[in-house]
Image: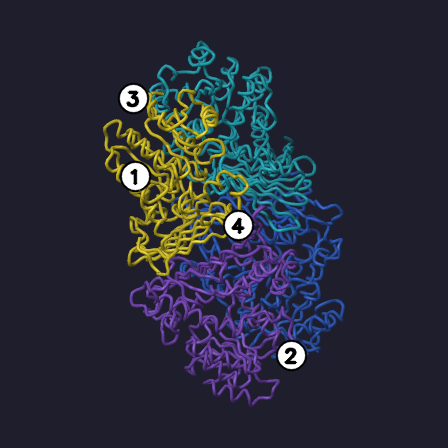
Chain colours: A yellow, B purple, C blue, D cyan
Amino acid sequence: MSHSLKMGLIGGGPGAFIGDVHVKAARLDGGVDLVAGVFSRDSAKSRQAGRSYGLADERIYPDIAGMIAAEQALPEDERIDFVAIATPNDSHFPIAKAFIEAGFHVMCEKPMTHSTNEARQLHELVNRSAVVFALMHNYTGYPMVKLARDMIRAGDLGALRKIVVQYPQGWLSTALEQTGQKQAEWRTDPARSGAAGCLGDIGTHAANLAEYITGLQITHVCAEVTTFVPGRRLDDDVSCLLRFGPDVRGILHASQIAAGEENALRIAIHGEQASLSWCQQQPDVLMLTPLDSPPQIWKRGNPWVAQKSPAADRATRLPAGHPEGYLEAFAAVYHNFCDTLRARKHGRHPEALVQDFPGIEEGLRGMRFIETVLKSAHSEVKWIEF
Amino acid sequence: MSHSLKMGLIGGGPGAFIGDVHVKAARLDGGVDLVAGVFSRDSAKSRQAGRSYGLADERIYPDIAGMIAAEQALPEDERIDFVAIATPNDSHFPIAKAFIEAGFHVMCEKPMTHSTNEARQLHELVNRSAVVFALMHNYTGYPMVKLARDMIRAGDLGALRKIVVQYPQGWLSTALEQTGQKQAEWRTDPARSGAAGCLGDIGTHAANLAEYITGLQITHVCAEVTTFVPGRRLDDDVSCLLRFGPDVRGILHASQIAAGEENALRIAIHGEQASLSWCQQQPDVLMLTPLDSPPQIWKRGNPWVAQKSPAADRATRLPAGHPEGYLEAFAAVYHNFCDTLRARKHGRHPEALVQDFPGIEEGLRGMRFIETVLKSAHSEVKWIEF
Amino acid sequence: MSHSLKMGLIGGGPGAFIGDVHVKAARLDGGVDLVAGVFSRDSAKSRQAGRSYGLADERIYPDIAGMIAAEQALPEDERIDFVAIATPNDSHFPIAKAFIEAGFHVMCEKPMTHSTNEARQLHELVNRSAVVFALMHNYTGYPMVKLARDMIRAGDLGALRKIVVQYPQGWLSTALEQTGQKQAEWRTDPARSGAAGCLGDIGTHAANLAEYITGLQITHVCAEVTTFVPGRRLDDDVSCLLRFGPDVRGILHASQIAAGEENALRIAIHGEQASLSWCQQQPDVLMLTPLDSPPQIWKRGNPWVAQKSPAADRATRLPAGHPEGYLEAFAAVYHNFCDTLRARKHGRHPEALVQDFPGIEEGLRGMRFIETVLKSAHSEVKWIEF
Amino acid sequence: MSHSLKMGLIGGGPGAFIGDVHVKAARLDGGVDLVAGVFSRDSAKSRQAGRSYGLADERIYPDIAGMIAAEQALPEDERIDFVAIATPNDSHFPIAKAFIEAGFHVMCEKPMTHSTNEARQLHELVNRSAVVFALMHNYTGYPMVKLARDMIRAGDLGALRKIVVQYPQGWLSTALEQTGQKQAEWRTDPARSGAAGCLGDIGTHAANLAEYITGLQITHVCAEVTTFVPGRRLDDDVSCLLRFGPDVRGILHASQIAAGEENALRIAIHGEQASLSWCQQQPDVLMLTPLDSPPQIWKRGNPWVAQKSPAADRATRLPAGHPEGYLEAFAAVYHNFCDTLRARKHGRHPEALVQDFPGIEEGLRGMRFIETVLKSAHSEVKWIEF
């Protein structure tokens, strides 16, 4: 399988969630092999995890510097093509920086960095370098999200007016971080997570989804950011009014204390002539409600979807009625990222359909979104410019 | 049918919507007869409407003063017991005032008056008088809304944290008021509707629903109020951050330009231990999502509902699975209002279950909500106290 | 209110369900007054019920013969125009016969009679008489059921192929009839209910709905009829293959032991070019799934519904998004029945839109359906002709 | 990656659907590499497909015999461990036979063979051999299907009474097979598909799902099997009454002419104390409706699911709210099959949780189901024993 892209992974050790998702998603369409990684700061745990992924011991590295040096020493057709960074937020920047400077392409988890300052540095570094940098806003990989974007681009909604994006979760309704649950621990720890909790973890997904689908940019925010659970050190709930330029209004609601909610990211977009709505928990469905005819249920895998949105079609693997989910959307981001790398390898310029994945700009916007919302949360002034 | 309550109606002429709803709802459970009214400012139209309701010509009056005088002249067992006011907002106050001063009970449409000043006067008048004054916040009549309130009262959710209430409609997405559509005309006309459009028409329902269910009061608002449709003279969209005292946060979204939406009033209430959600378009269903067990679908008409909420049971006419809707909820408000009048007639004090309908306090709060949200909308300061 | 139709009611005493529904539904649109009745075989109970409906004592009758004699003795503009029969099945025939022979119009509950033999006699009697006879298949009153019928009539589905109609209830999962519950008692008692339990009570609704919507007639059945609950004397579950002539196939499933189901009557109709589906528990929605475009959600109250189906529009009282339910559909059957009586009174021929309610033909078909399904259930031959 | 299982694939060439699904599913959890195959009878196409899977040319074989010989000649740690058979039905038997006789484990698509006679031979062969034989009834891989089975095993429904299983699709509503569409061509061709069309393709899935979940076996059928589309050579619609022993009744509906339906396999199971329902198009949800409390929505990934069903937990990769779909369920069947092979390799007996996948018994039952239903379809006798 010499033509496969070779993937390195940072993170994904015992107790982790997203590292394994990266591996499964990257491999889903074939043509990607996980060959190296640092899976934990603890080398015994790293070894254990690496072996469970089927890696040879010599490519399970104890640290980043060692990994980079060793991989650079390998022949070009053996060394990793790219690295996926799936660690807590505080280490994204140093790891990404090291791999970029060593010339490796990067797939990075979000939020992109620990601070906006780091984000600005990384932005500059990526723009100066030749590497491809992708940011894992996985929800943009869903075919029906791409269809929504393409309907709006095609003018099917007319001028947009109002956007309501919500991301309720309930898993942090109690002080789960005090029970030893690893995911809760680091995500509520400022040292590892950054200045924001819920806001960074899922608020950024909601903001990114709204911008990705509409093609608009948030220009002003007015936010209420709350920590409900006693003893918690970061926010667990966000309410936010949004402006997208002078003509479009919005609301963002993100919460990790919405008891009983699972991962109910959803968006409603209202235009002059029609509205769209989509919910991540039924991702194969996009509802279109025109002003002058019955609501329509657009479902992934049908010919009218493919015709309206080649991007949705490209992100579709299975026929209609055969549900695709979270991994498949994640894999769709990888698919475009990897096809971009393949095009680069062969000296081709990847076409627009292929380059459709979030990158350094979205990463920087995400960090600035966090910064701006927190600024608003602490301000008595109504609108803070973004 | 001498024991029936006798109802008068103001409004409900040709092209009107809500007047006929009042009649159907009031009569639904029996024991109420429509016997008199002024159905239009145009006496020919009033005559036409009154006859279509089966009224005798002598009780179809040309104006309010005439109606009051004539009804007062009738023997007590023939004259109206109460009047329902279903006219555009600008006339609520003078009509209500006249009937109250003449000693008739009143069922009034919302928003209660044209201005907060009028609301304050009416509040004082009602409190000084012996009449029963009801405000038609019909959505409080739904059994599952009452169940939600009673679950929260019983502590099933623990302390409340976050409330998200939404009321999207799409029927004013275009300049319908310029086409001669009567409902759109007066509802977008400041002279008849008051200072607010969407905010008064449906935003007040959303705010009232949140307060009714939770038993909390909005204390601060931070609002964005918008007119999207060119040429429209009142707002058609509201986004609002809410505080319910120091510990509870909220979001209110009301819109009449949410293309394709019908009447999708809905609310999600998140507490420490569980969440509730309800949508007016599936009114027989209340979703309860506890932290530690599967989500439960509470449906009207089942014994566990009756046991948890005698108020929901009282507002239920049909067995489970036999849908009840808008008219039935409307009728439930009438049921309690009318049973209160009946108790009064017989010198009994109505029990709490019976007195469960919105009145003058809710009416004044609604007008002050409009005033406060508009003040916030025009302010650069983030939070405006309510 | 001299122009109102005057209604008599048989049944509807304490513990009854459907009698009160008849009253509420008949009165919903105005123009109908309940003025007389026999509400129970027990005259004290009849008196009690009659008074609760607001009737004068002299029109609360102890028995049918007395009622007919007394009403006939009244001046024409005081006596009842029609009688609604809402008693257990065994008394439908003698009561209907008596009123028809006395020249009163009849609204009868289904199943129409206790036996097919009675049904044939009644059929003959009605056809010989001048009275209007309506059968309360209330589910045909739903606007979206009428829309479905009109879409099929208009050829929107192409030739029909397959019909799946289901009516699961769970309320008889246990031996409820042994607990004193009145509804369960008579419905499982052959003496009062007839030869069939679930089959007659709800299976006939399902069959009627399929025939009403499609305009087709069941020609053959192949049935399995079961009594699951020990000690029960009538069936509580029906599975049935159907043929509608040579080209259309169907399945009917009706059950009263489908634990946890409420009243989930639903139908799917598949044609060459599209399918329709509808469920009574969300009655305002009709789903249309064409072969070559996204599924469409047709919702009551929208202009495209009115345009496609004047009958649906006529059966609609409230705007889109304001839920209508069971009572409203029931009332729609009354509306057409009563407007037919009004037309007759004024010597006019009611138009087709008005005559759209089930009658003696549907009643006879229902009884023959019961007979045929039971014959099939006891036969080793596969198909029994209907 | 020397510890990986090595997979061969038969089928999956250009225009195929299910071959690629096998590859993606087998690889999803890691530890399986596709290393060899025959992807088409046309060797150029086979070559093309094999390369697209990243295979070395020397392991892309022109035919089965050549593949078996060559693989047997490889060292044990290089040769394939198992073969997946994803060809049209007519070739399942000879291919499976050849690989089994050569000692390779087999994952076979359903229906298992072209005829019942072949199925009986294969059954005998597998039982005499030491190979592991799995049948790809992928819908048994869904976690919520396993949860349903485990709830029933635990007695949560009480004794079962009625089962309604439906599998409507609409993709063969027109004569698609006459347009050159490859999937439609072979599935409607008796030479390749066998004696049944819709019945074999999806009816067997429905029957298997009912038996898998309930632990019961169908004992009698009474069927109507129809070909609706003119010119079609196999059935495209099935209606069937079922008996599961003396006490349990059922209905099976499978159709490929249910216009607008996608892949809506669904089942409702009614027991004495509760019912379950599940639909493949929302696979993460299982509805439990008890007699005496509100319906419960069991959703994949929650602790109460894991506690009730270790099998559902084992088949779960992602947290609640992160949708899993068709590929993941397919992969769950592979996961158990492959873990069984791994246990065998290490001389361990696989535990019951691991051995939870359909095999030769289910394959033979499926073929006998086809035979029995067709016999019933052509019989005038009502019940045919299964």
Q: Amino acid at mark 3?
A: Glu
State the CA–CA distance, disc 3 to disc 1. 25 Å
The crowd level at tag 1 (other Cα within 10 Å; few <14, some 14-19, many 20+) is many
Which residue position holds label 1?
Answer: A122
Marker count (numbered): 4
State the CA–CA distance, disc 4 to disc 1. 37 Å
Q: Secondary structure at mark 1?
A: helix
Of B118 and C23, nearer the camera is B118
Which residue position holds label 2?
Answer: B3
Of C300 and D375, nearer the camera is C300
Which residue position holds label 4?
Answer: A259
- Establish whether labels 4 and 2 are both on one chain: no
Between discs 3 and 1, the one toward the N terminus: 3
On the image, the x and y values in percent for residue A24 come to: 43, 31
Q: Secondary structure at mark 4?
A: loop
Q: Secondary structure at mark 3?
A: loop
Of A310 and C375, nearer the camera is A310
State the CA–CA distance, disc 3 to disc 4. 50 Å
| Comparing labels 4 and 1, the label whose residue is closer to the camera | 1
**Chain letter of disc 2?**
B
**Chain letter of disc 4?**
A
State the CA–CA distance, disc 4 to disc 2. 50 Å
Q: Amino acid at mark 4?
A: Ala
Residue A76 image label: 3
Q: Is residue D154 above or below residue D125?
A: below
Q: Are marks 2 and 3 in contact (CB under 8 Å)?
A: no
**Chain letter of disc 3?**
A
